[in-house]
Image: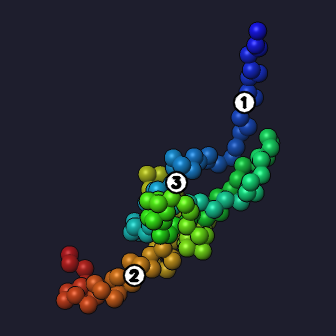
Amino acid sequence: MTSAPAPLPPAPHVAGRILDAQLHLMDRQVLDHDGVPVTTVDDLEVSGLALDEEITPGTPAPVITALLTGSVLGTRIFGGRPPSSRLIRIPWKDVAEVGVVVRLGVKGEPLDPSWVERWVRDKIIARIPGGRHDPR
């Protein structure tokens, strides 16, 4: 006869908000403080974890240090992981709110993820007649 497993101890109280990375962060749109789209979250950078090491009970929870974004379409289609040098970091300290979208507390213009949009705006759209002003 097998005995029932021992009940789990209650979860310790944690200050702050607990996020499920897959549910609350991955593939979420990132908006700057003006509501302008910047990018989407492709991966996370965390501290407090070592690769290929077992996590022992009682180990403090990892801490998110940055949101990662970049050209990951090819790896999503064909598998694998993009090299870390191809990913762009948005420091976690710049994140103001996590909800349906991830809102930043900073302007998106100087951030690296928006360089493609800036390049297209400045090199292509601006050369189209009427492309230098807001059509409103």
The residue positioned 64% from the left and 48% from the top of the image is: 16
Q: What's the distance in space between the residues labelled 3 and 1, CA to CA?
A: 26 Å
- Can residue 41 be seen here? no
Q: Answer yes or no: do the residues labelled 3 and 1 have beta carbons within 8 Å?
A: no
- Looking at the image, the residue that sits furthest to the top is 1
Measuring from the top left, give residue 134's x and y in whole percent: 25, 79
**In the drawing, does residue 75 fall left or right of residue 117?**
right
In front: mark 3 or mark 1?
3
Classify residue 84 by image quadrant.
bottom right
**In the drawing, does residue 75 fall left or right of residue 59?**
left
Element under disc 2: helix
Dot 3, crowdedness within 10 Å: few (<14), some or many (≥20)?
many
Tag of residue 118: 2
Amino acid at dot 3: Leu
Which residue is identified by label 1?
A: 10
Amino acid at dot 1: Pro
**In the drawing, does residue 8 fall left or right of residue 133?**
right
Mark before the other along the chain sequence, 2 or 1: 1
